[in-house]
Image: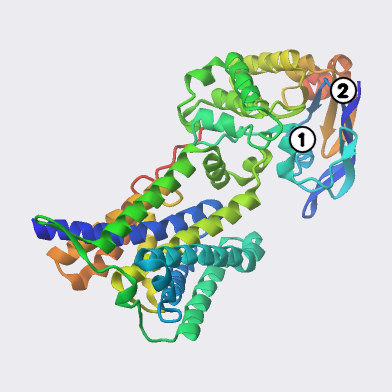
Amino acid sequence: MSIILEQLLNGLTIGSFYALIALGYSMVYGVMKLINFAHGDLFALGSYLGYTLLVWSAGAVSQRFGLWGGMAAALLFAFFAVGCVGVLMERVAYRPVQKSGRLPLVVSALGVSIFLENLIMAVWGPRYQAYPASVVPTYTISLGWFHITSMQLFILILSFVLMLILYYVVQKTTFGAAIRATALDKEMATMLGIDVGKITLFIFFLGPALGGMAGVMNGMYYRQISFVMGWNYGLKAFTATILGGIGNIPAAMLGGLLLGLVEMFGAAYISSAWKDVFTFLILILILIFRPTGLIGEKVAEKV
Amino acid sequence: MSELLVLKDVVVSYGAVTALKGVSIKLNEGQIIAVLGANGAGKSTMLKSISKIVPLKEGKIFYKGKEMASLSAHDLAFQGISHVPEGRRVFPTLTVEENLNLGSYGARKRLLDEEVEETKKWIFELFPVLAERKNQLAGTLSGGEQQMLAIGRGLIAKPTLLLLDEPSLGLAPILVKEIFNAIRKIHEESGTSILLVEQNAKKALAESDYAYILETGKISIEGPASELAGDERVKAAYLGGSAVTKKE
């Protein structure tokens, strides 16, 4: 019983990372029809930026604001900084080639990915870096037979709150409807007075920002970060996006959580060495049998 | 009556193809103007040039006496121009009500919330089926219902000028009648000026004050709608009247 619960928590935790990254993939795909292959590296960049803030002058931020204050500062810093990098990326690498079609866009995205990965290596070095134990809480909360680390609880709560806010904004507000309309038909959206440029800017800020925040959470959780981590997480989150159904916000959340659970239960009951195999097996199966994803089914447009 | 919209020698081209070769039209406030023509004559391009979806190569467009050169396409809804495009283009995965509400998005800074609600009520009176289906996804509506939604989405912004692109296209005769009745009612009840692009010449001429005939990017004939309805050339080409005489 306790192993099931433990894997459930682990799965949901890692699933939250996937879900937060998947949201960025899905939103960007929605407005630009682009698989942003640099998205995983933005996640890694967030991880490094949060790390830098926390270890800066021997953990001055955590000493000044306390453990939780330091964490909040690192998360917010990564959120805004990576969001700005995302906006810059759209301006420099995507907008100029957008008119040339989808293939140049994808190539450009791969270019940004390679650039970011090497930038991280050049700045922080090729070796693993570690979030020091002194900047993250390490205690465990126990209620009888139920145990959860404070870090896990924090990650789960924060991710779910973020996803709920995003879900509300996108599905229930007029601004969210404008985002969905832009994703469906840019020209028509423009004719209704929606500034598609502004919506694109918003998406390219928010998607990377959430990914950057997930990067910091990931660093705090595993403590160890590396400049190549973006590739692996990027692919996993991409799988989650496809699993749920690309371009659909709730689907990305579902796909991420589901994938985290599959990985963790697979690792526990079959073999942890096969963890990545499960992920990519799911990717292949879903592409063959249900390419629209679990809930990404489009309503046929009657003409 | 003052001039609301004036197109002066408008030229539009897509790459090597010139779709509009110097088109001039005029629409006075409160009028319904029809632009008729066959497929590919440039009718939709003309409306898109007014909406700034396609750029002008030459010529000028004046709206309320001012040139629109400095405006962006997404400013036009605020300026009081609503474009109901060919093929309806409702957002299929949004609900009927979400589609309608988005119609007021660009105009929300000049309209009060109560005005929008009031206009919505009026639209629901015009097209009761939209009220019945307001929580349904727009993609599940029939073609005629989607057309009503598209028109409603254009009206909710309380436009000064409504651009209607082939509202009767692909609809059953009974629905065509219903749509044209609705257009008349909209004009009567709101006084909105309408620029109506149509292939259904007979119906369009019956509803409009003045009409232009567009042929391969040029205006070939123009005149008051009642005159055009009796014009031999128009009858021959667009009303299917004297096909026999043409043969001889």
Point out the image quarter for the N terminus of chain B. top right
| Residue marked by disc 2 | B233
Residue at 71% x, 32% y: name it: B110
B247 left or right of B138?
right
Residue A141 visible in the picture? yes
Q: Amino acid at mark 1?
A: Gln
Q: Nearer the viewer, mark 1 or mark 2?
A: 1
The image shows residue B99, relative to residue A289, as above or below, that is above
Q: Secondary structure at mark 1?
A: helix
For mark 2, does the 10 Å Cα neighbourhood hold few (<14), some (14 to 19), or many (20 or more) residues? some
B93 left or right of A252?
right
Spatial distance from mark 1 to mark 2, Cα to Cα?
Answer: 37 Å
Residue at 48% x, 18% y: name it: B132
Q: What x and y, as percent, mark residue A197? A: 65, 52
Label 1: chain letter = B
Q: What x and y, as percent, mark residue A301? A: 50, 36
Residue at 51% x, 36% y: name it: B92
| Residue marked by disc 1 | B79
Question: B2 or A63: nearer the eye?
Answer: A63
The image shows residue B247, relative to residue B25, as above or below, that is above
